[in-house]
Amino acid sequence: MNQIKARWSNNFHQLQVGINQGCNLSTILYCGFSNQIMEKTQAAKDQNGNSYKFALGFIDDMVVVTTPDKIQQTINETIALYKEMHLEVNTEKCECTHPNFFNKSGIVNFLGQDFGKTAKPLAKQITDNLKKKFDGYAKLDIPNKDKLLLFCQCIVSACNYGPLLDVAEHCAENKQLYQEIDKQLMADMEEILHSNASSDALQKFAFDFKCQGGLGIILPGAYYDQMKVDQIQKIDYYIRENGDQITKSKLEQIIGKINAKMTKSKNFFRDTRKEMKIQEKMSIQVDDTVPKPGYTLLGRRRMDNTAFQYMINWVFNNVRDTPIPEICELCKKPYKEGHKQDCKKINELNIAAHDRFANFLERILRKRYQARKVCKDNDNRLEDRTKPDISIVVNGVQIYLDIGITWDLDKYYALKEQHYRDKKDQNGNPLKIIPIIIGKNLTIHQKSREFLEELRVNLETIYEEIGYMISTSQTHRAELMYRKKVVQRGEKHSEIDVEKPSANRFASLADSDVQFKHTDSYRKIFDYLHEKGMMKVATQSPIKEVPAKPRQKNFEKAHKTKTKKKSTQTAEKGNDKLEDTSTKKKPDKPTQTKVIPNAKGNDKKIQSLKEKIAKLQRELQSQFDTAAAVMRKFKETKKKHDDKKITQKTNNAEAQPENEKKKTEVSQKAEEYRRKSA
């Protein structure tokens, strides 16, 4: 509406200032004024019948090249063109310059730039700017995943424009320059990945498409020939459209015009890259056994450095081939056969990863297939009380999806398929259950992938979520390991597992028989001891207890016991032998290990520790008592409320006949009143 009013309005004001640099009005002003001037100038011809040529256009600047004898004539023609567009030329800002010609070679230097029939290769300019750009990105205080994303989207994509816009001759020397750029890019990417992989493995990871387990990066040296062929095809198409013949004199002008069009078109390189990927994917078969971390590494989800490094280890080192530890790093128990199934900590990680992927898949299928989680609704249960994870409706048929995360895809899929064979619901109807088996090596079972493709699910998002799920579960695993710190005291110390409370260890620590059952109190005591400097935190994981040496409280007393030994004669029952009581051996007693809070030892510290422990126990007991009292009070009030509701219902039931009787009496009186009034 404002545009229509402004179009038919005469209330215009003269502007005293121009527009800012990079303003959105720049393109509008260019199309409205500068472009029309260039078109009119290009349509006009001089006395010899030659037309003017343009390479670049700006909003408020124009450069006119002419001969010395026609300077004034050209200026007058240019000013006349501007007047037709209601524009004025500021002659004070105009300047006449003389270009520098180098040795009559046809090369002109204007404003510090060389112009000639054959331009310099862009590879040299790219090489000079590449190091500066990467150093700027490397200094950013951001996660490594974001650095890799910026590296691929900003640095690599900028280098890829070189072969497409380069007007230099297509030869082996120029191709070698771009191959050197590839080597520099690979060195920069290795610095981001923090990997000691070989150059061949790193290059393969960068070049392979995401469906092959790589990043799918297009580098200028590797795709130099294909980019040049694409550039020539664009040139041939332009020549056919304009009806020109290929000549050496016009080839430079044609390339300049095509490059100008490619520079203006933002989607040119994107379309070219898509064409390359489509051609490659048509001849590639997806290998379901190969990990595909590229979707996650170049995805939109944020990732910390721990998860990022775990993904990189999957690429260059198989994590599954690492040696099995003797002790589980999470529960500190011996790592025996079947420990993965019995360990509660490992099961917690597996359950969390399973639930996360189930929620993700349910969100994707919710709108199109009416997906809902079975375990959440708790109403779709099989005859043996087992339940799948998600139920969907496809063409009016209900299908159940059961998700599993494992190492061995084929074995687990066969077990699931056998388990859900010939299953029926509570009504005896057959069920269709499809196992969705996800590999911990960032893969999907072939049959599960084919079923998801039939549902028209974007597999890129699935692979991205799988990688994010597996890597973040390893981050959670690292957090659990970080909590498993041990307590160390002085030089001679004993190490205690902080994760699980132990009454015996606390009894030896405080020389008391106090039993502790609450983890929070356990942590409070250790935090207090750590703050007071009585204990040090160590990073060693095995649990050891070093027995403390016996101590002598007084040096003089110890010296007297060594020099003066008293011997007494005692008679045993039924025997006349005399024994020296000082040399008599006492019966061996089981040695008790005492853990001393300080290396020097101090009875006052032990006594204060006992008091702290007793105080914490009293506080916990009081908290439990108050909680129990609140619970009892809540139950009493709830019972009263329920009784009140029951009595109210009975009263309403009893009062209902009386209310109906009153209603009938009122209606009869109203009827009598109507008859009297009539």
Image (cartoon, rainbow, N blue to C red):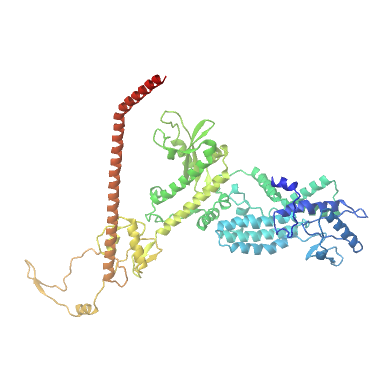
Taking the image as shown, residue 211 lies to the left or right of residue 50, namely: left
On-image quarter of the N terminus:
top right
Taking the image as shown, residue 396 lies to the left or right of residue 605, namely: right
The relative height of residue 24 versus residue 654 in the rendered view (above or below) is below
Q: Position of residue 76 (x, y in %)?
A: 88, 59
On-image quarter of the C terminus:
top left
Taking the image as shown, residue 589 lies to the left or right of residue 367, namely: left
Extreme residue toward the front, this view: 677
Q: Position of residue 660 (x, y in %)?
A: 33, 25
Give the quadrant of residue 68.
bottom right
Give the residue drawn at x 74%, y 55%: 13
Extreme residue toward the right, this view: 47
Residue 413 visible in rendering = yes
Residue 337 visible in rendering = no
Give the residue drawn at x 50%, y 57%: 306
Give the residue drawn at x 30%, y 35%: 648
- In terms of depth relative to the viewer, which is nearer, 307 or 4? 4
Give the residue drawn at x 64%, y 53%: 217
Give the quadrant of residue 619.
bottom left
- In terms of depth relative to the viewer, which is nearer, 671 or 658? 671
Q: Position of residue 464 (x, y in %)?
A: 55, 48
